Amino acid sequence: MYYEWQKVYIMQFTEGLRAVIWASQETAEPYFEHWRDMGLKYDYLVVGAGLYGATFAHEAKKAGKSVLVIDKRNHIAGNIYTEEQEKINVHMYGAHIFHTNNTEVWNYLQQFATFNRFTNSPVANYRGELYSLPFNMYTFNKMWGVVTPEEALEVIERQKKEAGITEPKNLEEQAISLVGKDIFEKLVKGYTEKQWGRDCKDLPSFIIKRLPVRFTFDNNYFNALYQGIPIGGYTKMVANMLEGIEVRLGVDYLKSKDEYDAIAEKIVYTGPIDAYFNYSLGALQYRSVRFENETIDKPNYQGNAAVNYTDKETPWTRIIEHKWFEFGKDSDGEDIPKTIISKEYSSEWKVGDEPYYPVNDDVNMELYEKYKALALKEKNVKFGGRLGEYKYYDMDAVVATALNYCNEELK
């Protein structure tokens, strides 16, 4: 079970009897020294109740280890946290759609949730013109009127030559090489520059390589062997992973680091690696995201879970309509008369903001390597996950890396 807010589960043994005392974090602090003297330690302290931390905590408990999970936020599940509003599970930190080709990871998560058959097929809105994503024959037909893959390839190759691109050196040149100048100008440039706050010429080419380009009429974005959304939301899934494990929420590990380190043999840390070292070498860069949520008194707002706004003038990058992650669109959602949308605004990150996307350019990766060297010197501390490793992770990769660490650590 897990305990909300700043309640702390305090154990004392008196004359062979165990008493359970509830207290705030502040009230609990004097007991840390008492616990240490009595030898009441956890095998593992897991910092962060997100997907990496929950996976490790579950496996450690299964291996017979004592585990304490703490999180700075007042809820579990990290950025995949969902909250029920108007009978709709709202993705409070942006859309998260699980997809994987890893059968081991898929089967592992089936213990904790039943997934629906949601298929991600976003739409691009460029000044009122709607295009199919990911880039596929529907996109090419709408843009150029072509009807065969050969015709589409001819247009792309011609526009690539006209741009004089041989070896792409940045995101702009890479995008034009993949989909031509027209699609770059309408569907890539504005969206990407809003997302990253930088000109496409100043962004590395590998970012655009993550976007699928298909010369088929297939608008299944991920096209993975397994994909979907946990029925009932991600929070329910993570709660099932943490069942029977002590969890304390609203706890800032870095403010009470010495005390918490003293009650655990080992630490699994999933927070920002630079924050762990008090930004001693400088702050790593991230992009942050701000959400404006709105409940609308109609059953259907945009007819799709995700619509990207690719012109530069529209301030938000996309609008998410949450009900379509779990409810079929064939009914127009009439069984739920309201809908909830989120407008997403990308912003430059500063210390104190919520970090979302690592800016994995050469400068930041060089700085990360220095922090990684410091991390390797930390005795009995494992740095893991998106923030601990300063790496963009899909959810399946988070689970896979956590399970790999479990196999090394808990065998």
Image (spheres, rainbow, N blue to C red):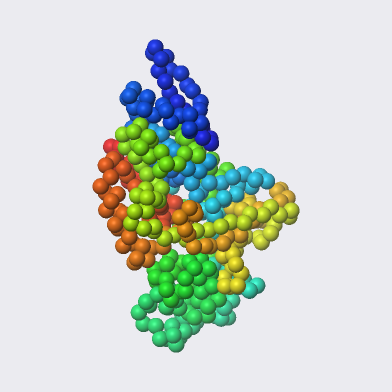
Front residue of 96 and 157: 96
User: Where is 104 relative to 256, above or below?
Assistant: below
Residue drawn 37% across and 44% down?
269
User: Where is 349 relative to 33, above or below?
Assistant: below
User: Where is 70 relative to 30, above or below?
Assistant: below
Residue 270: percent from the left, percent from the top?
39, 46
Residue drawn 40% across and 43% down?
254
Residue drawn 48% across and 79% down?
180
Front residue of 214 and 251: 251
Residue 5: percent from the left, percent from the top?
53, 36
Residue 18: percent from the left, percent from the top?
43, 17
Residue drawn 69% across and 52% down?
295
- Specify whether residue 55 is in view: no
In which quadrant will I find the C terminus? top left
Report the side of 260 relative to 306 (left or right): left
- Specify whether residue 349 is in view: yes
Q: Residue furthest bottom?
A: 162
Residue 316: percent from the left, percent from the top?
59, 64
Q: Residue furthest top?
A: 15
Tell how many labels. Answer: 0
Front residue of 146 and 392: 392
User: Where is 137 relative to 347, above or below?
Assistant: below
Q: Quadrant of residue 170?
A: bottom left
